[in-house]
Amino acid sequence: MAKAKKRGLGKGLSALIAAPDDGPVAAASEPADGGERILELDPHAIEPNPKQPRMHFDEEGLQELAESIKRDGVQEPIIVRRVDERYELVSGERRVRATIMAGLDTVPAICRHVSDADMLKLGLIENIQREDLNPIELARAYQMLVEEFDWTQEQLADEVGKKRATVANTLRLLNLPDDVQRHLAEGAISMGHARALLALPSAHAQSAGCRRIINQGLSVRQAEQLAAPPKPKPQPPAKDPNIVAIEDDLRRCLGTRVSLRTSASKRGKIEIEYYNLDDLERLLGLLRSTR
């Protein structure tokens, strides 16, 4: 992976191809020695990478890139591989699309001998490292790498240069229902919102929570509060059985509810309830009769 990038990307055209002694290179030719050479290919004829993780291409961003290509040309060649008489894209789909939008007849390309396994790895990891995939595309790219190469999450994290917790949290996004994944991919909700929704107990609750976030414009903090389980009401501490017995005895004597409140210092108070003025007169009479 790293060696491939050092050979082909970021070093400029002069570092990729030496000037030949026998005239210009044919547009669709490859060097006999297996080295790399810049080709000029018809962008319409290049077949897309079947392992491309990106599902959505920002039209405004593509238009800006197309304008840049009209003005300055394609600054970084795409990478392709030869399949029979065809060329299949390994990486650089945005550049291919923008080249077509710009109306150019050719796009510079580097042709490499890339295996199916490396095809997937190059296409996915290039996109991951560029950090221009949306969260769902990134999660699907991670999942494809895990399944294709039988990697653990820790191995995946090492390969893509991310923390294991970051990789695990991204993969968890695929547990969300399809409608929530779509809203996340389109930017209607953020990664923070999505992580909060994962705390809800069912797909139905997650979808409903997502709609509420969008309709009410909830912040991530508000979404976390929405998804948090209700806190159980604190239970009062159990009363001393001796206190309970005294309350019961006074209740029977006075015919109303009686509560004893005690403190750690053994001080306290007796609360006697009455329900109307007549009941108050009755209780006062009982208390006066004890004098």
Image (cartoon, rainbow, N blue to C red):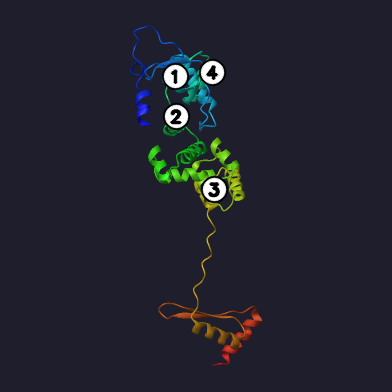
Residue 283, can we see it?
yes
Q: Residue at x 46, y 18 (%)?
A: 68
Does the residue at mark 4 contact the one at mark 1 (Cβ under 8 Å)? no
| Left/right of residue 257 with respect to residue 88 in the rendered view | right
Image quarter hosting the N terminus = top left
* Sequence-first tag of 1 and 3: 1
Q: Estimate the x, y position of residue 177 in percent, counting from the top left.
A: 59, 44
* Marked residue nearer the N-terminal end (4 or 1): 4
> Distance between the Cα atoms at labels 4 and 1?
12 Å
Task: Say which quarter of the image contains residue 158.
Answer: top left
Quick check: can you spot residue 91? no
For the residues labelled 3 and 2, the Cα–Cα distance comes to 39 Å
SS for dot 1: strand
Between the C-alphas of marks 1 and 2, the distance is: 17 Å
76 shown above or below 235: above
Q: Residue at horizontal 51%, vertical 27%?
A: 49
Q: Is 150 in front, or is 19?
A: 150
SS class, disc 3: helix
What kind of residue is marked 1?
A: Ala
Residue 196 x %, y %:
51, 48
Q: Nearer the viewer, mark 1 or mark 3?
A: 1
From the image, state whether disc 3 or disc 2 is nearer to you.
2
Position of residue 82 relative to residue 160, above or below, is above
Which residue is denoted by mark 3 in the rendering?
197
The numbered dot on residue 109 is 1
Mark positioned earlier in the residue sequence (2 or 4): 4
* Crowd rating for badge 2 (residues with CA inside 10 Å; few <14, some 14–19, many 20+): few
Q: Position of residue 95 (x, y in %)?
A: 48, 22
